[in-house]
Image: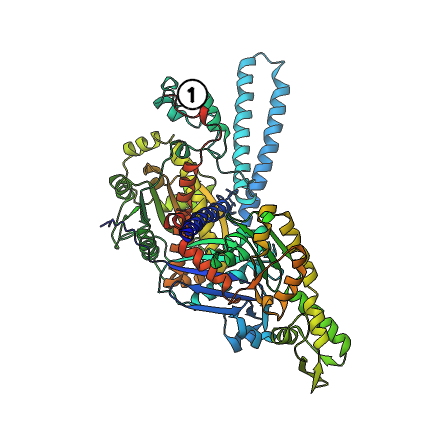
Amino acid sequence: MPKVKVSQQDKALRVGIDLGTSRSAIVASNGKRKWVQSLVGWPKDFVARKMLGDRVLFGDEVKEHRLSLDVVRPLAQGVIKSGTEKDEESVAELIGHLIGLVEPRPRQKIFAAVGVPAEALKVNKRAIRDAIADYAEKLIVVSEPFAVAYGMGALDNAMIIDMGAGTTDFCIMHGTMPSVDDQRSLTAAGDYIDEQLLGLLTERYPDSDFNMNIIRSFKEEHGFVGDALAQVEVEARVEGRPVVHDITSEMRRACESILPAIAETAMDMIARFDPEYQDQVRNNIILAGGCSQIAGIDTYLMEVLSEMGPCNISIVDDPLYAGAQGGLALAKDMPYEYWMDM
Amino acid sequence: MGSNNRKTGQKIIKAAILHDVYCGNRATEEPPAIQQPLRLRRFPRVPVWARMVSLMVGLSLAGFATHAVFQHGSGVAPQGGKEDAGYATFGWNQEMALLFAEATAGLRRFSVAYPLDRVEIPYRRGAVSLLDEELPTGSGLLDAAGYQLLNEQPGMTVANLFGLGVRTIIIDAGHGGRDPGAIGPTGLKEKDITLKIARLLYNRLVDEPGISVVMTRDSDITLSLKQRVEYARQYDADLLVSIHLNTIPGSPLTVVETYYFGPPVDEQSVDVARKENHHSGYAVAEFNELIAGLGDTLKQQESRKLAAYIQKSVYGALSRDNRSIIDVGIRTAPFVLLLGAEVPSVLAEVTCISNTEEEARLAKPAYRDKIAGALERGILSYMNQLRQQDRRQPEDGSTIHAES
């Protein structure tokens, strides 16, 4: 016999996801939060499949087995490269993995707000939507700096500078959804620092072997700008033997290499803003993203920007989760009927 | 007081921003482009030697025909029995031409792929002829300019024009009871799988607010197509989605296709239709009545759109697991079920049970749930699109609006 039933329950799990170039994080309304390295790996061949099983690997596991895997870093330049299926697929797999990490109840619907690099949003919003659609019942996609701004409640006369790995995204909030003019992206970001540092170090220590992973860990541990508080000494290998190198000046030069472009863009964007509110924006600049953790970066920028007048720069408390938190706030605040219409 | 003001100000800004986010995201959900259906070439069952023979017969007949016409034609004029000879010439000519046509048609069917032709486009002039009778132009609801607009605006359909929505969805699990439907290589029956997918789809849709969902069958019972159509009428259905599995005997291909009612595009659709029309339970007189009510523009337009949404989401979901799966697109075929239902209705052949690997996948609950999820997404995005179209005001509404 046919059965007829109408129900209006809302039991969906809200999640905020930060789809970063280097790290991706998820925060869910059930209180769980997790992050992974944005790395997706497929076993390369028969032998690898035998060893790892026929499955997709993520995050640290990929790092561990990287030699036997086809590794994809989704959104590598901040965008899904069109035409490469693996790129879209890796985004989908990563999202699926993240949602699995927060353990939704079986068959529970997922309402997701996903923050992506501003450039990706501009170039291929639709591709991102399609990639995620399999895992989330309802879905909104927003730009990363906007998600951060929303999460911090910095909705009016504020400027977010989200310094990630692939891109540094700027976004000015003035009480509405930021338009194209209110947002800008630079490739002066974490990956650029790594490249500079690698170049400088191989120049100075040609006998030592460095690779990107090692360089990145140096930066995350010792990165600084401005005057050095202490010597930066790291262990490297020369012909297989450990040797201690002093990399203080190289580290400073590499980290500072991105700042002129960032400062200039920030000043330019403020200068174009309504003159009446420029003071307010200048006093409400928020740094987010992994690179905001580089020591001294806020004072350096503050010094440069103060030539326009007094300014105040703050750094988000928890750069790893700030974007995902903002996404969750957005997902929670979004009225139910809006969701149903999506 | 001041902080209170700030709080409410923040609230207003938040609401405005949320609305902007919602609008921005909704704008990216465009309806899927309706592609040309991919025509599967049916490989000839006729062996090669038979084709060669028919080719030779065809050619020799053609040669003979031209020869005969030529001979008769030249020999007619000088003779007295002019009329008789003339008849003879004509008769010969026609007969030969017919034979020739038949022979070549036979050849074409088996050895030459037809050129791709498009699914019928329902936005032609005169596509609203049914309305023409029911709403005389004097009533002011639709004047000549309105017709013009309806026919020329590619996105405008009857449903959009009248702001129709969806309240009741009928899910039909194909086959059942005495009729097992297609049977896979290891014995999995179509009727069981369609029922399981239908149940999953029902469970997914039933939580959706504002719509009620009805299943034509919730157990392994025999239902004629007529009974299924009657359910749809009885429950005032607004949409009918029938779930089926395809089968391509003797072929490892896996295809996804979605049908809506219309003239057949090729013999393969006729074949599929014949299989699914089995046990229809309609008498000839009733059937004729159904055919008579066929000029239903609304139903065709909407069925086509619904089919496109479902096809897109099902193919999208399944192709992730199985790269060799083929997107055949949306097709028209004369299914009795689709003809009988008065509302937008589609028949989704979600995958091929005749493929061994696909059969193994279909035996797993997770895979069936994936298919159900894809069907759900297709249906919901179709409904969203209806709602959105409804909300969107025509920029120059004066030509469409009722005058009083």
Q: How is the image coloured?
A: rainbow
Instruction: Judge whether A43 appears above or below B194 on screen.
Output: below
Instruction: Judge whether B186 appears above or below A275 on screen.
Output: below
- Residue B297 location in percent, x, y? 40, 31
Question: Residue visible at 28% across and 51% down?
Answer: A7
Location of residue B300 (image quadrant): top left
Question: Residue visible at 66% across and 74% down?
Answer: A215
- Outermost bottom residue: A241
Is there any visible trace of residue B267 in the rendered image?
yes
Q: Amino acid at mark 1?
A: Asp
Question: Residue visible at 50% across and 71% down?
Answer: A54
- Outermost left residue: A1
Read off the chain for label 1. Answer: B
Name the residue that disc number 1 marks: B143
- In-front residue for pair B216/A89: A89
- In-front residue for pair B155/B200: B155
Could you tell me which secondary element the residue under label 1 belongs to? Answer: loop
- Residue B292 location in percent, x, y? 34, 29
- In-front residue for pair B286/A326: A326
- Residue A262 location in percent, x, y? 66, 59
Is there any visible trace of residue B262 in the rendered image?
no
Instruction: Judge whether B149 appears above or below A240 on screen.
Output: above
- Residue A129 location in percent, x, y? 50, 53
Instruction: Judge whether B179 appears above or below A31 on screen.
Output: above
